[in-house]
Image: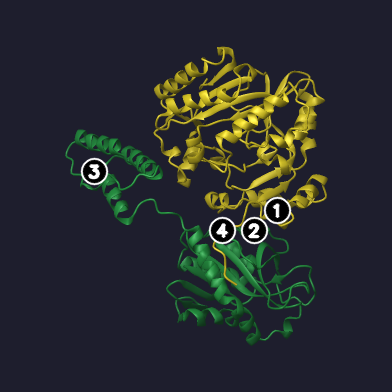
Chain colours: A green, B yellow
């Protein structure tokens, strides 16, 4: 699942259109849903971002392979051309801790340190700035790992926020929307933990463990992991046979047999 | 633009503490890593100790952090390592993390991050050591890391060797798996410095010591170090209880002495796998290798092979090594 979080409806529009996501009314802010993505419109600024991100991730807690993309427009110095997509490798906010999303997967976009400010920035800064990223990270890091987050901002202006219209914001983000979704997909694949056991195997293991003592269960877990991580193929048949024991000797014998087979 | 599905290469991002930004060592490293994204940070712990890091994923794209180490600079020699009879035995942490990725390494259980912190204020380590140098003192400089593996960039082994040259009581052990002897081959060897290579059978290297040089490359580096006049210790440690262990490690000893004259070797260390039970638990949770799932025994908080297995392995290898070396040059690591 990809969590796409943006401040304004204009910033989410390209993703809603691309994915044909549908409006949901389960949360008290704009939420669009799709099989592979949840798109949230938080409203602008630190507090809105904090509240909406928290509500979204509480509503649907992220899994180990989910990715959060905070997308939006940002002001930047003249060195960054309007329309440039920047990935933030550092998030700052005056008087608060700095945050560092992990930069794992290669990309060809610009990278920057991004400062989150409290209101639209009219005075030029030496680095790009937005109003939400820091708050999104602060909240999301309670729910997910630093490798699961991506902060993607498109340069909309050189500290002249009054010159950016909603329509322009949609067009500028739309130019990168498809590539960003593909990148998020790739990141999802990259971070997905390899499953050591199939669903069928997991069910059989759980069934077995119900018949064993706690200590035996731990030992069985270790033996199974060792077997599989050493490249062992299908689990021995014994692991799938139902365990009906009436005596602890019988249970011990079955346990020993499985450990030997592994 | 087609987005990539490949990780960034190693050290694609260089994080630098603001206070070391102007140090010559920092500038030299920045000049070496010109393609890296430079990110200024306030303190390395803000990055290295973050919550929610994924060790396994970071291993695929390690970043380098340049930082200033604060005291303590030296740590008392650990229970898990050999002090070689020195009353003063310290180890330093000039680096946190390692460029190599060995499945049996306790660093996976020790740190939240697979990134590497390189402390660039090496002189402060030397100053901290000075009060101890009235007596023979051993310092293991490559204990929590592999300094020689990163020598071309860090120059830490070189700095320590040059410092030891000026301090008559200072003895160094530089433990490594690196084949990068070239990085220090212009230095005059020093009797008080031991270069200690960890060797494993090639099949073990391929399976468990990711990103490390091959056995052949390590042997070539050992031969070269001996030619240059360095004292060389070989550490077959940890010995892993893999299938055919006795024969495999016995053959390794034979292979070693096929290339190295027994008289030339300073000493040989043999030790079986061991790790604090606490670190082992963390390694298990990473599920990266079968090694942590071996049915170890926990004795006094340490996970070890069952006593019988440990003794079988060590006595077999000791016997094998004794064909080449007199017993006093073979050291065994066993739980005290």
Q: Are marks 1 and 2 in contact (CB under 8 Å)?
A: yes
Residue B52 appears left or right of B94: left
**Label 1 sits on residue:** B15
Residue occupying image coordinates x 64% and y 80%: A172
**Label 4 sits on residue:** A147
Mark 3 vs mark 4, CA separation in Å: 39 Å
Q: Quadrant of residue B244?
A: top left
Q: Are marks 3 and 1 on the same chain?
A: no
Mark 1 residue element: strand
Q: Which badge, 3 or 4, comes first in the chain's sequence?
A: 4
Q: Nearer the viewer, residue A233 or A180?
A: A233
Q: Does the image show residue A54? A: no
Q: Quadrant of residue B38?
A: bottom right
- Within 10 Å of the Cα at label 4, are there few (<14), some (14-19), or many (20+) other Cα atoms? many
Mark 2 residue element: loop
Q: Does the image show residue A261? A: yes
**Label 3 sits on residue:** A238
Q: Which image quarter holds the N terminus of chain B?
A: bottom right
Q: Position of residue A78 (x, y in %)?
A: 78, 74
Residue A46 appears left or right of B288: right
Q: Are marks 1 and 4 on the same chain?
A: no
**Label 2 sits on residue:** A100
Q: Position of residue B108 (x, y in %)?
A: 54, 42
Residue occupying image coordinates x 58% and y 13%: B328
Residue occupying image coordinates x 39% and y 51%: A196
Q: Chain of mark 2?
A: A
């Amino acid at each position: 699942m990809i969590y796409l979080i943006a401040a304004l409806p204009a910033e989410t529009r390209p993703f809603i259109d691309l994915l044909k996501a549908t409006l949901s009314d389960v949360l008290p802010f704009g939420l669009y849903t799709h099989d592979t993505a949840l798109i949230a419109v938080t409203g602008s600024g630190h507090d809105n971002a904090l509240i909406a991100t928290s509500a979204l991730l509480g509503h649907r807690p992220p899994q180990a392979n989910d990715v959060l993309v905070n997308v939006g427009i940002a002001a930047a110095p003249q060195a960054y051309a309007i329309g440039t997509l920047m990935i933030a490798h550092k998030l700052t906010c005056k008087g608060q801790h700095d945050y560092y999303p992990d930069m794992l997967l290669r990309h060809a976009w610009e990278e920057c340190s991004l400062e989150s400010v409290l209101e639209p920035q009219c005075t030029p800064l030496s680095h790009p700035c937005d109003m939400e990223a820091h708050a999104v990270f602060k909240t999301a890091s309670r729910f997910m790992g630093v490798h699961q987050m991506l902060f993607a901002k498109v340069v909309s202006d050189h500290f002249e926020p009054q010159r950016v219209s909603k329509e322009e914001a949609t067009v500028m983000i739309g130019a990168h929307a498809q590539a960003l979704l593909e990148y998020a997909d790739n990141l999802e694949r990259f971070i997905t933990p390899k499953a050591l056991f199939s669903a069928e195997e997991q069910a059989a293991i759980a069934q077995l463990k119900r018949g064993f003592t706690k200590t035996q269960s731990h030992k069985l877990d270790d033996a199974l992991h060792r077997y599989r991580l050493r490249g062992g193929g299908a689990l021995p048949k014994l692991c799938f046979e139902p365990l009906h024991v009436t005596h602890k000797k019988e249970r011990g014998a079955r346990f020993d047999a499985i450990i030997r087979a592994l | 633009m087609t987005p990539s599905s490949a990780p960034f290469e190693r050290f694609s991002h260089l994080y630098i503490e603001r206070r070391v930004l102007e140090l010559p060592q920092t500038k030299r490293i920045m000049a070496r890593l010109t393609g890296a994204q430079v990110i200024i940070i306030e303190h390395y712990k803000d990055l290295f100790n973050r919550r929610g890091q994924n060790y396994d994923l970071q291993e695929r794209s390690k970043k380098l952090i340049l930082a200033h180490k604060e005291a303590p600079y030296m740590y008392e020699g650990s229970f898990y390592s050999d002090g070689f009879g020195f009353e003063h035995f310290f180890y330093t942490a000039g680096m946190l993390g390692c460029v190599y990725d060995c499945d049996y390494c306790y660093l996976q259980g020790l740190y939240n991050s697979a990134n590497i912190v390189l402390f660039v204020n090496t002189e402060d380590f030397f100053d901290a050591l000075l009060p101890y140098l009235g007596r023979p003192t051993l310092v293991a400089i490559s204990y929590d890391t592999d300094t020689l593996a990163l020598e071309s960039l860090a120059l830490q082994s070189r700095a320590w060797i040059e410092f030891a040259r000026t301090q008559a009581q200072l003895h160094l052990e530089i433990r490594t798996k690196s084949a990068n002897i070239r990085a220090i081959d212009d230095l005059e060897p020093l009797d008080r410095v031991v270069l200690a290579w960890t060797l494993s059978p090639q099949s073990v290297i391929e399976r468990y010591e990711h990103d490390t040089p091959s056995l052949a490359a390590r042997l070539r580096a050992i031969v070269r170090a001996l030619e240059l006049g360095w004292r060389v210790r070989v550490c077959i440690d940890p010995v892993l209880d893999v299938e055919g262990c006795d024969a495999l490690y016995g053959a390794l000893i034979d292979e070693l002495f096929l290339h190295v004259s027994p008289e030339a070797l300073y000493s040989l260390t043999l030790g079986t796998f061991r790790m604090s039970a606490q670190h082992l638990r963390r390694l298990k949770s990473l599920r990266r290798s079968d090694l942590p799932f071996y049915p170890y025994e926990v004795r006094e908080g340490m996970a070890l092979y069952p006593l019988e297995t440990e003794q079988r392995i060590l006595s077999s290898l000791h016997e094998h090594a004794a064909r080449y070396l007199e017993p006093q040059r073979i050291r065994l690591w066993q739980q005290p």
